[in-house]
Image (cartoon, rainbow, N blue to C red):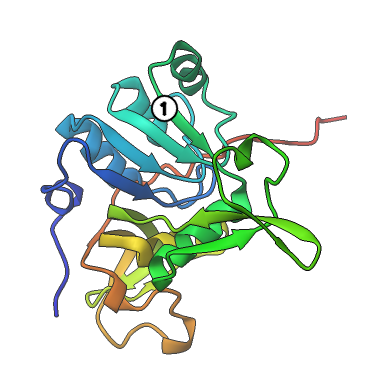
């Protein structure tokens, strides 16, 4: 099956106001830049966004926050975005902060068909408020529910027309799990190849999880915090 679409605008054409989206990436690495730009251009509102972080003020999900397109963020880290902080403190944005490992496992569970699981992370903190707590082998655990989304937007290094994906480096942190947990998964790739050109042993996400794929353009690949050694 040929899953290729022409561009990001075509890929996200049926995302509507009020939907839940997963957006892959870690920091600014491996984020679906083209899809985010298309969402901003489409002016879709009332979105619930599940992402490890919220980008920065002028890049990534930060662009959507600027346009007030996001009503709720489900994330583990949002410390680099001043606009996010402002909206949170003013009550404009609903936020669910989740321990990073718990977020990863909730995504994985959503893709694997596991409805919920127990974890010790967050016990005794605000994270545990309102959640079922059970004692296993002398240790307390919280019940955490799987995460799913109407659409998962991911970005890969290489992909083929059947939707098989290979991620590079840090981009592999959240993208593969989100690709499994979306009802519809849209993949943008740096390089789109023909079926058979990818080494089967190197594929991280099989094409069965991907419904649409396109070759992205003009990737900025920003460095979130550049640290260099001063000249002596």
Residue 56 higher or lower than 4, as above or below: above
Quarter the C terminus occupies: top right
Side of 35 where 137 appears, left or right = right
Residue 160 picture quarter: bottom left
The residue wearing badge 1 is 94
Residue 53 higher or lower than 201, as above or below: above
**Rendering coords of residue 74 (x, y %):** 45, 40
**Rendering coords of residue 105 (x, y %):** 54, 61
Residue 29 higher or lower than 232, as above or below: below
Element type at marker 1?
A: strand
Q: Nearer the viewer, residue 128 or 191?
A: 128
Residue 87 picture quarter: top left
Q: Can the viewer see residue 176 in this picture? A: no
Side of 208 where 93 appears, left or right = right
Q: Nearer the viewer, residue 65 or 19?
A: 19
Q: Can the viewer see residue 18 in this picture? A: yes
Residue appearing at x 30%, y 72% in the figure: 209
Residue appearing at x 23%, y 38% in the figure: 39
Quarter the N terminus occupies: bottom left
Side of 224 where 94 appears, left or right = left
Q: Nearer the viewer, residue 228 or 179?
A: 179
Residue 139 higher or lower than 74, as above or below: below
Side of 159 where 213 appears, left or right = left
Q: Residues within 10 Å of mark 1 (few under 14, many from 20)?
A: some
**Rendering coords of residue 78 (x, y %):** 55, 32
**Rendering coords of residue 101 (x, y %):** 62, 55
Residue appearing at x 35%, y 44% in the figure: 33
Residue 154 picture quarter: bottom left
Q: Count of labels shown?
A: 1
């Amino acid at each position: 099956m040929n899953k290729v679409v022409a561009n990001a605008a075509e890929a996200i054409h049926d995302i509507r106001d009020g939907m839940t989206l997963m957006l892959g990436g870690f920091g600014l690495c491996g984020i679906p830049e083209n899809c985010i730009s298309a969402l901003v251009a489409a002016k879709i509102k009332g979105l619930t966004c599940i992402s490890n972080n919220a980008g920065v003020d002028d890049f990534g999900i930060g662009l959507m926050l600027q346009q007030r397109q996001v009503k709720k963020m489900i994330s583990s880290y949002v410390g680099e975005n001043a606009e996010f902080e402002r909206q949170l403190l003013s009550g404009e944005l609903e936020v669910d902060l989740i321990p990073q490992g718990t977020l990863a496992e909730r995504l994985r569970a959503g893709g694997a068909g596991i409805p919920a699981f127990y974890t010790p992370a967050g016990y005794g903190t605000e994270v545990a408020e309102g959640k079922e707590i059970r004692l296993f082998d002398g240790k307390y655990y919280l019940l955490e529910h799987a995460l799913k989304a109407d659409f998962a937007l991911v970005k890969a290094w290489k992909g083929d027309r059947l939707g098989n994906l290979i991620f590079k480096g840090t981009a592999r942190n959240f993208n593969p799990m989100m690709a499994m947990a979306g009802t519809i998964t849209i993949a943008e790739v740096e390089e789109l190849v023909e079926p058979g050109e990818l080494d089967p042993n190197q594929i991280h996400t099989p094409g069965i999880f991907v419904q649409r794929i396109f070759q992205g353009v003009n990737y900025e690949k920003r460095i979130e915090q550049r640290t260099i050694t001063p000249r002596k």
